Amino acid sequence: MPSSDIEKLNRLSTLLDNRFRIPGTPIRFGWDSILGLIPGAGDLASLGPSAYLIYKGYSLGARKRTIARMTVNTGLDFLVGAVPILGDVFDLAFKANNRNFALLRQELALTSKTTKDT
């Protein structure tokens, strides 16, 4: 996978989950948390970029198992995120997009290593 694709996906996951920091604390949040403050529509809006990350994983050849884990992370983020207040706190802690990017990066590193060994 070209490193530019990895960088773009990393920027996307960072923008969604870690872009901003609450001053004086180590707590980071992104647009996923901000959009989640808008009841219903916000969680639905952040689902698009999260689904794009999964799509890119699929198109880059990630295994079905990895895609399934990414889908579960995104689904959990969407479902729990839709619950007022609890969902907002959950978004701050769970960071589904960062988890999905880490899964994808690990998967592609494994795939790359396996390809080089053969």
Image (tube, rainbow, N blue to C red):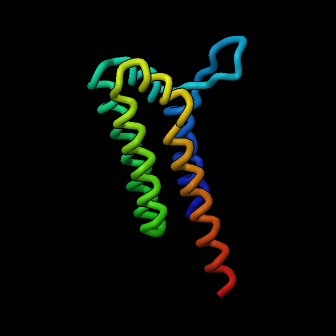
* Residue situated furthest bottom in the rendering: 118
Query: Which residue is nearer to you in this view: 25 or 51?
Result: 25
Residue 89 point in image, percent of width and height: 50, 23
Residue 114, quarter of the rendered image: bottom right
Residue shown at 72% from the left, 12% from the top? 24
- Does 2 sit above or below residue 6? below
Q: Residue at x 39, y 33 (%)?
A: 80
Residue 61 lies, with reference to residue 37, above or below; the image says below
- Of residues 6 and 90, the one nearer the viewer is 90
Please give the name of the residue rendered at 42% of the width and 26% of the height, measured from the top-left corner. 87
* Residue positioned 49% across, 41% down in the render: 96
Q: Which percent across, then down, holds residue 6?
A: 57, 53
Counting every numbered tag in the picture gives 0
**Depth order, front residue of 5/14:** 14
The vertical placement of 60 against 11, above or below, is: below
In the image, residue 55 above or below residue 14:
below
Give the image location of residue 102, x and y in percent.
59, 51
Q: Quadrant of the C terminus?
A: bottom right
Position of residue 45 in the picture relative to residue 58 (left or right)? left
Residue at the top extreme, as displayed: 24
Picture coordinates of residue 4 (x, y %)?
57, 52
Q: Give left or right: position of 86 versus 99.
A: left
Q: Quadrant of the N terminus?
A: bottom right
